[in-house]
Image (cartoon, helix red, strand yellow):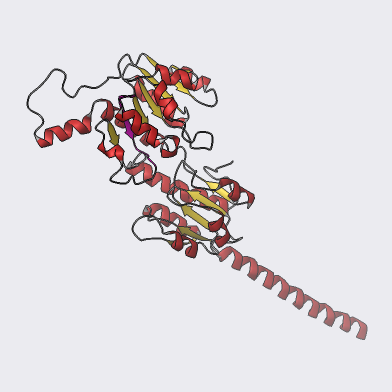
Amino acid sequence: MAFSLTRFAIATIGGQRQSLIQTIQYSRKFSTKMTKPSVYITREVNKDAVDLLKEHCDVTSWTGPGPVPRDELLKNIENKNGLFCMLTDKIDSTVLDKAGKNLKVIATMSVGFDHLDTQEIKKRGIKMGYTPDTLTDATAELSVALLLATSRRLLEANQEARTGGWKAWSPFWMCGPGLKDSTVGIVGFGRIGQQIARILKSFKPKRIIYYNRSERLREAQEIGAHRVNFDELLAQSDFITLVASLTPETKNLFDESAFKKMKSTAVFINTSRGGLVDQDALVNALQNKIIWGAGLDVMTPEPLPLDHALYKLKNCVILPHIGSAAVETRNEMGLVTARNIIAAFKEEKMPYELIV
């Protein structure tokens, strides 16, 4: 009987101990679930994106004017679990070191990612997200608008109208090259390049040709575009639209040699990255009528200094990097960036994971 009571006492004490252990474990598990991951946003973004993040994360952000200063980024990224950044933010080993081992995901509100040290980020096992599909239509629309503004001299004509240069209708005043029966060349035949081609078809060009690292046979056949090598595109095109990614291989793709291979009547448009163009070579090509004109939404550096030679040229139209600046597009970019971060924390498939 004594033996049974002893066993009962031990069992009771053991049971209480086990119950206590289970309670502690449950409490820890519950506490972990209740602890939200921390995210830093490097710019003011749309409220919908911030509200979505706040449902799942503790959010802090830079709210000052312009891009987040480097020292502010380094100060605020410390011990954060996620980073919501922009193409104006250089995310390198210095930032990653400051963030520490808690950083699990970096999502950029852009399709371009040359501001990210992707290899260093990958080496540290940090997931990356971007927004490739969301800005396709907006950037394609802007590319075509810039092409037309350049070729039809819209800004120059507007200035003449405002300053008294418009005297009377004249047969060849303010004339520029038209798209009908022309050859359009597209460098970079991804989503944006293909959409540009679809839009330009309605202007009845004679040919649409493209240069791309890989063949896009099905899409090209649907559109009616033909793949050529780079030199052929330069020599044959009346209009060249550059929408390629900036990589070490494509840096300064359009240099002095490339411009000299183009028609003297050619119009050059760049809505991708300024680093794809040797800017000094472009200035020389425009000044010396090696090409007819250029329209730029991207430059090096950005913003372009006000005393830069490009601003002095009437045959160059310059825009302040507004390719995706449609309200709906920018809102969607913010939401996609937030969804990328949330999915990474939940260990779910990210809407747009950047895999390099």
Q: Closest to the observer: 116 or 291?
A: 291
Residue at x 58% of width, y 41% of height: 355
Left or right, 20 with respect to 356, comes to: right
Q: Closest to the observer: 238 or 49?
A: 238
Q: Residue furthest bottom?
A: 2
Q: Is residue 23 magenta?
A: no
Figure quadrant of residue 70:
bottom left
Left or right, 321 with respect to 348, comes to: left
Q: Is residue 294 magenta?
A: yes
Residue 178 percent across, percent down from the top left: 27, 19
Residue 64 percent across, percent down from the top left: 35, 61
Residue 199 percent across, percent down from the top left: 35, 25
Left or right, 164 with respect to 145, comes to: left
Image mark count: 0
Relative to 26, is 255 above or below? above
Left or right, 26 with respect to 252, comes to: right
Residue 81 percent across, percent down from the top left: 55, 59
The magenta-colored residue range is 289-300
User: For the stretch drawn in magenta, what is the main secondary structure?
Assistant: loop
- Screen quadrant of the C terminus: top right
Q: Residue furthest left?
A: 167
Relative to 12, is 231 above or below? above
Note whether residue 156 is visible: yes
Note whether residue 1 is visible: no
- Screen quadrant of the N terminus: bottom right
Figure quadrant of residue 263:
top left
Residue at x 28% of width, y 29% of height: 150
